[in-house]
Every structure is written in C-alpha cells, then in structure tokens.
Image (tube, helix red, strand yellow):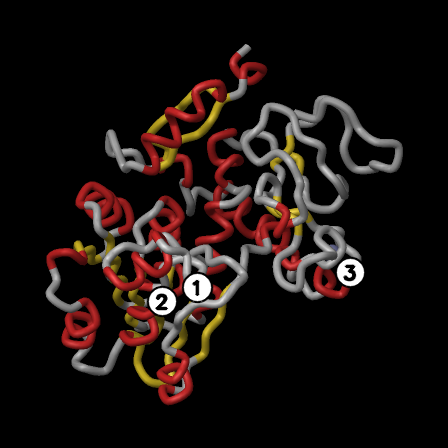
Amino acid sequence: MVEEVGPEVQKLKVGDHVLVPFNIACGKCAFCKQGLYGNCHESNPQATAVGGIYGYSHTAGGYEGGQAEYVRVPYADVSPTVIPQGMDPDDAVLLTDVVPTGYQAAEMGGIQPGDTVVVFGAGPRVFWAVNCWWMFGGGRYIVIDQFFYRLYFVRNYANCEAYKFKEMADRVVFLNKTTDWMGADVVIDAVGAEAAGNALQTITGRKLLLQAGSTTALHWAINSVKKGGIVSIVGVYGPTDNLVPIGNVLNKGLTIRANQASVKRLLPRLIEHIQNGILNPKALITHRVPLEEVSDAYHIFSAKLDNCIKPVLIPPSARM
Ligand SMILES: [Zn+2]
C-alpha cells in the first residue's frame, strides 16, 4: 500500500494498493523505450548489463528492499501498477516477479506449435510457467529436477513429463533418446548458478568460486537442444566469467536468449489472463510466513523442507 508519495508522482496516491515489479525502470532511457525494462540504464548506470533491482546488491544498483516492510520506490509512475479491483492479492504478489519471469522464458524460447520443450529446474516460476506455456502451443514439455516432491507437483499442476535427474545415468543422452536423437526444439535453463549434478562444476563454481557459480544446467541445455534450436535462460547467473561450452554453441548454430524479466511490459497481458481465469498463480503458494521469521522461511525454502513450493512473507502491517 502506498504510504507516502514524492512531489513529482502523478499516477499514484496514498492508500493505493500497488504491485511493484522486482526491477526498477526509468521508462525514458533507450533500453526502457525498447521494452527492456529489466535492462534500464538509468536505474543502474554503473552496470553494463542488468538494471536496478530491489535488494540485489550493488551490481544491481544498491537499492534496498525486496523483502522489506517499507521500501522507497524510485520512478514510481513507471512500473508500479495499481492492483485491479477484484484481483486476489496472492495473484498480484506473484505478478511482481515469478509469473512474468516464467512467461518471458517461453517468449524468449520462441515456442512453436508442436515443439518439444525441455526445462531444467522445477522451482515455482517453472510450475507456473509450464502451466502457462501450453498456451504457446508446445507439443511436449519435459521438466528435469532433483527433488521428487517438486516433480510430483509440476507433473500434476502443469500436466507435463517430469524426471529426477539423479535417476538418469546421463541426462543429455536420455533427452536425445526421447527426442528420436534430434534434441529438443527449445531448452529452458531455469536453474542458474546454484545447479547441482556435476562435481567439477560444483567444486569450481560453488565451493572454490573459481567461476561465477556452477553452469551445469547450461551445459545440459546446450548439449540437449537440437541443432538450430533455442536455449532460453532465466536461471540467475552472475556477471563474471564461466566455463561454458561455447564451441558447441557455435557448431550447433544455436540461438541463446536470456534476460531478467521486463515485468512492466508483460503486466497488462498477464493481468488480463488472470482476470479471464486462464491463469491461477496463487495456487503455487504453499507457505505464509511473518516477515519477522524470514530466516526460518529461507531455511525451509533453500533446504527444500516441508514440500515448500512458494512461500510468501507477510509484514506486520498487512496482518492488521
Ligand atoms: Zn530506463
């Protein structure tokens, strides 16, 4: 809820209930004008890549907030959007990050009717996203993850094939075999730098930090997509170097697309889908945690305890 507005704010007033995208966009720079709100040049002028993001360190502009009870919102007339009448707040909160990110993953993948789409990682954005991606017309969705409860959930929630990678001798061979040795049309890396599954990557990327995190999922993505296919990355990687099979990218003629979600650009379409009953993001919420107990929530989520899919944090003022 808006508590106070600055003198130049025109569109919002005190008392409005708004959804605030996780990234900060000025709305006027060359990148915002192209709809690349996640790459705003004004909100994070120090960086060559990402725009400003709340609570995401100085590589993303050094803005505080993200999971705070109160937050200062720059460029308040640009991205913050008044929650439409009748929209459930649980749906609205997921529109600030998870839902647009999942939607953009499919958009970047350029999914065509009949395509086989492989997704590495079954986090909350993927549950929601695969459910939504059927709208893009893909013929087959295959999700790979390491936790059985998440695979069980995604299989039921999104009606897709789901496999535990630790039960496969070789994930790339398995995926090539199940696609008649052609490879998938589109592969989406929704894991990012925290990937498990390869000892060398885990040691060099997560333990010794010799590279910016483990690129295990990216390796699998590049090696299991068909020639001429598209790899779409929404898993988070840091800005510095990684050991990546770039030679295979060249020799397979791949298209790789990756970005942080341009939430502002996607919001009108996603709000419409929720209002029409096509999408139901709030079905993902499994845990509600008081903001003061955030460290417990992080432990539950990161340790994958209690079948946690998507926790939401409730600040004291929202409980009154
Ligand atoms: Zn901008």
Q: In the drawing, does residue 6 fall left or right of residue 54?
A: right
Q: Residue at x 36, y 86 (%)?
A: 252
The answer for how far apart the CA atoms under marks 3 and 2 are is 31 Å
* Identity, as a three-letter code, of the amino acid under mark 2: Leu
- Among the 4 quarters of the image, the one containing residue 280: top left
Q: Describe the element under mark 2 as helix, strand or loop.
A: helix
- Crowd tier of the residue under label 1, counting other residues whose Cα lies within 10 Å: few below 14, some 14–19, many 20 or above: many
The answer for how far apart the CA atoms under marks 3 and 1 are is 24 Å
The answer for how far apart the CA atoms under marks 1 and 2 are is 8 Å
Disc 1 target residue: 233
Q: In the drawing, does residue 8 fall left or right of residue 24?
A: right
Residues at circles 1 and 2 in contact by the CB criterion of under 8 Å: yes
* Identity, as a three-letter code, of the amino acid under mark 3: Cys
- Among the 4 quarters of the image, the one containing residue 84: top right
Q: Residue at x 37, y 58 (%)?
A: 205
Figure quadrant of the N terminus: top right
Residue in front for this viewpoint, 39 or 194? 194
Q: Nearer the viewer, mark 1 or mark 2?
A: 2
Disc 3 target residue: 29
- Crowd tier of the residue under label 3, counting other residues whose Cα lies within 10 Å: few below 14, some 14–19, many 20 or above: some
- Crowd tier of the residue under label 2, counting other residues whose Cα lies within 10 Å: few below 14, some 14–19, many 20 or above: many
- Among the 4 quarters of the image, the one containing residue 234: bottom left
In the rendering, at what x and y percent does residue 197 appear?
23, 58
* Identity, as a three-letter code, of the amino acid under mark 1: Ile
Q: Which mark is residue 218?
A: 2
Mark earlier in primary sequence (3, 1): 3
Q: Residue at x 83, y 36 (%)?
A: 9
Figure quadrant of the C terminus: top right
In the rendering, at what x and y percent does residue 290 appear?
45, 19
In the rendering, at what x and y percent does residue 257 appear?
49, 70
Q: Which mark is residue 220?
A: none
Q: Is mark 3 within 8 Å of ligand 1?
A: yes
